[in-house]
Each structure stands twice: as C-alpha cells, then as structure tokens.
Image (tube, helix red, strand yellow):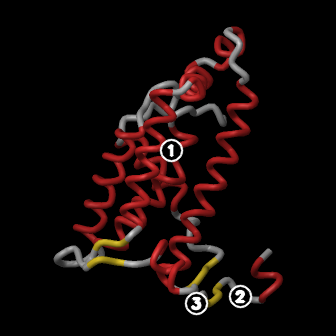
C-alpha cells in the first residue's frame, strides 16, 4: 500500500528530540533498543509465568481442544496474540524508523525466518505449549552475537545485530510461546 501511494518503499523520518531520545538514542555502541528488549522480556515473562492469561497461552498452544474443554477461551487467546504480534511489529518499526531516520516498507521481510530460529534456539517447541520469555531472550542473544561475530571482522555491527535480535524477539514471543496461531 505504501508503495502504491508514494511510488517508493523508503521515506525519511525526522523525529522530535524527545522521541529520538526514547526510541533511537545510543550510549556508545549500545542502542536504547536493548533497554526496550529487556523491558519487553520482563513483561512477557511476568505475563507468561504469573497470570491466568499466560496459563491460557500455554494451554492453547499445548492442546487447544483440551484447553477449550477446560474453559479457556482459545479463540480470544489467538486474537489477543495476533494483536500483540501486530503491536510488537509496529513498535519495532517505530524503533527502527527513529533509529535509522528512515522507514522502509520491506525492511522486516527477513525477520519471519529469523524469529523462528530465535524461538527454537531459545527452547520453544514448535508444536506449542512449552517455552519461556527468558529462553527466547537467550535465543536472541545467541542469534545477535553470532550474526554480529560473522557479519564483519571484529563484529562492528553490534548495535544493528542487537536491534535485529530485539526485532526477532518482539516478533516471535507472542506467537512462538503458544503456537496457537496454526
């Protein structure tokens, strides 16, 4: 749609200083996206481990028929996880748009497979019902470190790799922990 309206996939973004401070600033080589990544991990961990909705996510991912029989509103869980995935993707788009001062409609196309890799490395079962936010956090660290180490001599793309790892985490945590969206 963006390409049809503007005849290009790229746009320039010049955010106000406070928005840039919140979403795109850096301290040395560490981007603020790392703090957002940690905050989203903590929020996901709390939701998954300490709330009824977290139990519903695991139940729906493990066995939707049994979960429905136990009174879990599996359709609601699926809809909420779809919405959470969309919000997470938009959030990552905002972070990347502010950080790189541009937006590209095709920038996140490669994250689909990378998010699956991150989830599996983090210990999430593709069949559903098992996984943790901390496991996905570790998976993103491993993936980000490996892509940083192999991308350039000396791993000069650390900030970009952690931004990519955060993007993969934000994209995969709602869907990968449940596999309810099959």
Pointer 2 residue: 8
Total label count? 3
Mark 1 residue crowding within 10 angstroms, few (<14) / some (14–19) / many (20+):
many
Considering the numbered disc 2 on the image, is that residue within a helix, a strand or a loop?
Answer: loop
- For the residues carrying marks 3 and 1, which lies nearer the camera in this image? 3
Residue at coordinates 64% horizontally, 86% vertically from top-left? 10
Q: Position of residue 16 (x, y in %)?
A: 57, 86
Q: Is residue 99 above or below residue 55?
A: below
Q: Check the picture and name the quadrant holding the C terminus.
A: top right
The numbered mark, 3 or 2, whose residue comes first in the sequence reads 2
Q: Position of residue 94 (x, y in %)?
A: 58, 71
- Which quadrant holds residue 109? bottom right
Residue at coordinates 36% horizontally, 47% vertically from top-left? 137
Q: Position of residue 52 (x, y in %)?
A: 57, 23
Considering the numbered disc 1 on the image, is that residue within a helix, a strand or a loop?
Answer: helix
The numbered mark, 1 or 2, whose residue comes first in the sequence reads 2
Q: Separation of disc 1 and disc 2 at Cα?
A: 31 Å
The label number, if any, that marks residue 12 in the structure image: none
Mark 2 residue crowding within 10 angstroms, few (<14) / some (14–19) / many (20+):
few
Q: Are marks 1 and 2 in contact (CB under 8 Å)?
A: no
Q: Position of residue 18 (x, y in %)?
A: 51, 80
Residue at coordinates 45% horizontally, 31% vertically from top-left? 125
Considering the numbered disc 3 on the image, is that residue within a helix, a strand or a loop?
Answer: loop
Pointer 3 residue: 14
- Which quadrant holds residue 107? bottom right
- For the residues carrying marks 1 and 2, which lies nearer the camera in this image? 1
Residue at coordinates 43% horizontally, 60% vertically from top-left? 36
The label number, if any, that marks residue 173 in the structure image: 1
- For the residues carrying marks 3 and 2, which lies nearer the camera in this image? 3
């Amino acid at each position: 749609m963006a390409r049809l309206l503007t005849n290009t996939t790229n746009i320039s973004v010049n955010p106000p200083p406070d928005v840039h401070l919140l979403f795109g600033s850096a301290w040395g080589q560490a981007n603020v996206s790392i703090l957002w990544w940690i905050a989203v991990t903590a929020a996901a961990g709390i939701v998954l481990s300490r709330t009824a909705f977290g139990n519903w996510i695991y139940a729906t991912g493990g066995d939707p028929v049994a979960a429905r029989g136990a009174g879990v509103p599996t359709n609601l869980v699926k809809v909420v996880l779809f919405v959470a995935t969309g919000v997470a993707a938009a959030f990552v788009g905002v972070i990347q748009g502010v950080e790189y001062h541009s937006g590209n409609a095709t920038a996140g196309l490669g994250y689909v497979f990378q998010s699956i890799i991150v989830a599996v490395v983090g210990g999430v079962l593709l069949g559903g019902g098992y996984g943790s936010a901390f496991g996905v956090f570790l998976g993103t660290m491993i993936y980000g470190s490996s892509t940083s180490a192999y991308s350039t001599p000396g791993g000069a793309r650390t900030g970009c790799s952690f931004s990519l790892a955060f993007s993969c985490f934000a994209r995969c945590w709602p869907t990968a922990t449940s596999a309810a969206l099959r």
